[in-house]
Structures are given as structure tokens and as C-alpha cells.
Image (tube, rainbow, N blue to C red):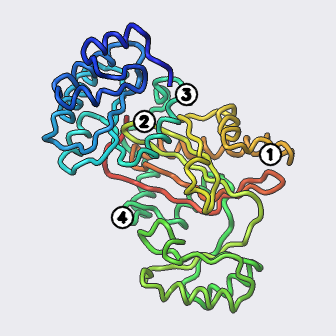
């Protein structure tokens, strides 16, 4: 992070002589005994043109904590003044503080690593990133009908999500849906081996965690046996379905878009499959994304060299650009109802062809527009 100017550091030192004022500003030693100085410190930083984001690390944020109260007062005051300063809290957040922080439009993270990722997206692009990204106040009629028809709790299932993406012209894997183990085996024979088998349970986002994904099945008997084991799992229901898809070769990518009150609209690109848990291999940018943005994201993931060696970088960037455009438009059309779209994996083969293998839509009834 860049150092604050000497002038601003001097202002902070005048308020809190025992602080470390460079960046990050550490006022712990001062406010342990003089909590009332915290508000003046925040206002001093916010009134400069050097600070865009103020993240406060609090051991425990509660509605009765004087530091939390002062932070909310300052954030609310600056929000009313249409300030461009963004506030956040990292630490353990008591249930009583959540509503207060939410009303003050203060971002909240309990894990520092989540904050690191969010800050990476902010520093990658200019201020006011969502100035040109305007979401309508209500979903389009077509989108509203689809959400209500497909909704299970706060999720839209994989098969419905993938069909919607197909209808919008994106490259989605061709799969078959079976209602029992015998039908799954027959469909697998028609698709051709090897195949992947997935259990579709309403309201369950991550199938692999419950044993609901089997890959590289080589025969009709293997498919039927695996399907029956899945249908017998404790988490399976009478509404569970079996999804059969061909196995694809290539590199697995994660592609996603999300919107939040704290940071607006973000595009995500990273390694997919099981590697998606490695947050260090994820790149974030504000929407809308351009082809140069996508090139930068691939470079941040250290994938440019591999794509160049395969002579497929331009082809891949063109397709990822179209995918991000379509996902962004879905956010716009949803009127704030869809908060997150995750495509994991998007398989990229050695000819540069992108194919969406799995998709998940998360929805909300809350207004989260920035």
C-alpha cells in the first residue's frame, strides 16, 4: 500500500501521538485508553483525498462497543454527504452488530483472507467501478418467471441454470437427466463412455461434498451401481435426479460474477474443479469486463504462457469475454434478485473451445444494489 503523505501523517499524530500513521494506520495503542479519539481519526483520514477505503480490525464488534458505534456514525455521516469512502470491518462480529453495520453500509469479513480477495478486486480498477453498471429496479418478466419456476430455497439448480445459459447461446455441455439408476445406465450408453454422473438434490449447492459426483465411469453397470449408491445417500430425496454427461479433456476454469452492497459488481476468473478452493489462484475485476481485463486476469493467474504455447489465447479470451457479457446481462435483467453466478468448471480444450460443465445461480429477495 502507498504511504500516506507526511502532512496527513502529521495530522494523525496530532490526534493520536502513539499511532503508527504511515499505511496501514495502527491506532491500537492510543484508543485502548482513549476510545473517544477514534471518530476524529476516521474523519481525518476520510477528509483527505488520499484514502479510498478504511478497513477497521476489531477483535469483537458489538452494538454496545464504542468503536463500532463511532465507526457507524462516521460511515453514516459520509454516506449522507455522498462521500466515495468505503468502510469495512474485519473480526468477530456479534449478531447485534450486523444490522447496525448493514445500515451504515459497512462491509463485513470474519476471515482476513476474504478481505484480501475483495481488496485485490478494488485495486485492479479505477474508482466508482459500477458507475456504468446499472441494474433495473425489478427483474424482466421473462427473468422473474424463470426465477420463480426454478427457485429452490436460495438456489437455482444445475440443470435449470445450464438450460438457461444454453437458451442464451452459451456453450454448455450436452447432458441427460435420469430419474432412476436403470435409466441413468441407458442414457450413459447413448452418450458414450466414459461419463460423469451427478446427483441433483434440491437446495444442495455442492454435490461433491455429499458424495454426489462420480467421474470417469466406464460402463453401463458402473453407472447403474454408482447411481444407486447416490440415490441411497442420506441427503438424497424423492426429488433427486441423476445428471449424466460426457467426460471432457482440457484445463478447468472457474468463471463467475457476483454483486454485493459493499463492492458492487465483480467478475471472477480462476482455476476450476477442486482447485477453486485455492483463493490465491483467483483473479477479480469490476464489471463490465473488456478483453484487456480478461488478458490481465489470465496473466495474474500465470496462464498466458500456457495459452500462448497452445496458440489459443485470442480464441479463449473471445469466448470468456462473451461468457462474462452474458452473465453480466443476467445480473442486470434479474433486478437484483440474482446475486451470484458460478460456472465451475468451464472446460477449455487444447483447441481453445470453452464448454460450461456446471452452473449455479444464487438468488435473494433482499435489495443489495450498491
User: Is 240 on the left-hand or right-hand side of 182?
Assistant: left
Q: Residues within 10 Å of mark 1 (few under 14, many from 20)?
A: some
Residue ID for mark 3: 125
Question: Alpha-carbon distance for marks 3 and 2?
Answer: 12 Å
Residue 263 at what x, y percent from top left? Answer: 42, 36
The residue under the point 43% across, 16% down is 4
Question: Alpha-carbon distance for marks 4 and 2?
Answer: 25 Å
User: Is 103 on the left-hand or right-hand side of 334?
Assistant: left
Residue ID for mark 4: 153
Question: Alpha-carbon distance for marks 4 and 3?
Answer: 34 Å
User: Considering only order in the chain, which callout, 3 or 4, is on the residue closer to the N terminus?
Assistant: 3
The residue under the point 31% across, 15% down is 12
Which structural element holds mark 1? helix
Q: Residues within 10 Å of mark 4 (few under 14, many from 20)?
A: few
User: Considering only order in the chain, which callout, 2 or 3, is on the residue closer to the N terminus?
Assistant: 3
Which structural element holds mark 4? loop
Residue ID for mark 1: 307
Q: Nearer the viewer, mark 4 or mark 2?
A: 2
Residue ID for mark 2: 263
Question: Alpha-carbon distance for marks 1 and 3?
Answer: 24 Å
Q: Nearer the viewer, mark 1 or mark 4?
A: 1
Q: Are marks 4 and 2 in contact (CB under 8 Å)?
A: no
Residue 281 at what x, y percent from top left? Answer: 61, 48
User: Considering only order in the chain, which callout, 2 or 1, is on the residue closer to the N terminus?
Assistant: 2
Amino acid at each position: 500500500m502507498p504511504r500516506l503523505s507526511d502532512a496527513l501523517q502529521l495530522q494523525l499524530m496530532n490526534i493520536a501521538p502513539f499511532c503508527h500513521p504511515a499505511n496501514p494506520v495502527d491506532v491500537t495503542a492510543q484508543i485502548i485508553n482513549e476510545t473517544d479519539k477514534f471518530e476524529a481519526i476516521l474523519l481525518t483520514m476520510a477528509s483527505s483525498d488520499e484514502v479510498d477505503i478504511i478497513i477497521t480490525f476489531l477483535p469483537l464488534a458489538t452494538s454496545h462497543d464504542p468503536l463500532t458505534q463511532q465507526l457507524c456514525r462516521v460511515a453514516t455521516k459520509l454516506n449522507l454527504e455522498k462521500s466515495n469512502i468505503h468502510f469495512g470491518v474485519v473480526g468477530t462480529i456479534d449478531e447485534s452488530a450486523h444490522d447496525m453495520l448493514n445500515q451504515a453500509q459497512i462491509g463485513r469479513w470474519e476471515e482476513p483472507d476474504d478481505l484480501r480477495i475483495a481488496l485485490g478486486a478494488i485495486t485492479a480498477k479505477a474508482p466508482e467501478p459500477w458507475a456504468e453498471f446499472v441494474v433495473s429496479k425489478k427483474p424482466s418478466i421473462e427473468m422473474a418467471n424463470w426465477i420463480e419456476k426454478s427457485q429452490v430455497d436460495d438456489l437455482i439448480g444445475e440443470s435449470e441454470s445450464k438450460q438457461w445459459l444454453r437458451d442464451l447461446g452459451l456453450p454448455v455441455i450436452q447432458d441427460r437427466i435420469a430419474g432412476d439408476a436403470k435409466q441413468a445406465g441407458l442414457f450413459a450408453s447413448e452418450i458414450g463412455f466414459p461419463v460423469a454422473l451427478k446427483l441433483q438434490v434440491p437446495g444442495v449447492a455442492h454435490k461433491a461434498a455429499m458424495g454426489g459426483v462420480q467421474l470417469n465411469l466406464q460402463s453401463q453397470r458402473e453407472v447403474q451401481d454408482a447411481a444407486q449408491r447416490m440415490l441411497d445417500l442420506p441427503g438424497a430425496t424423492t426429488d433427486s435426479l441423476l445428471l449424466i454427461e460426457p467426460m471432457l479433456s482440457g484445463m478447468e476454469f472457474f468463471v463467475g460474477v457476483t454483486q454485493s452492497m459493499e463492492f458492487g459488481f465483480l467478475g471472477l476468473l480462476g482455476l476450476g474443479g477442486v482447485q477453486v478452493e485455492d483463493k490465491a489462484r483467483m483473479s477479480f475485476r469490476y464489471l463490465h469486463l473488456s478483453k484487456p481485463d480478461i488478458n490481465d486476469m489470465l496473466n495474474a493467474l500465470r496462464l498466458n504462457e500456457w495459452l500462448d504455447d497452445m496458440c489459443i489465447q485470442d480464441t479463449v479470451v473471445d469466448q470468456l469475454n462473451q461468457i462474462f457479457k452474458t452473465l453480466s446481462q443476467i445480473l442486470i435483467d434479474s433486478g437484483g434478485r440474482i446475486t451470484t453466478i458460478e460456472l465451475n468448471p468451464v472446460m477449455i480444450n487444447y483447441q481453445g473451445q470453452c464448454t460450461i460443465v456446471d452452473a449455479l445461480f444464487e438468488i435473494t429477495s433482499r435489495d443489495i444494489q450498491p
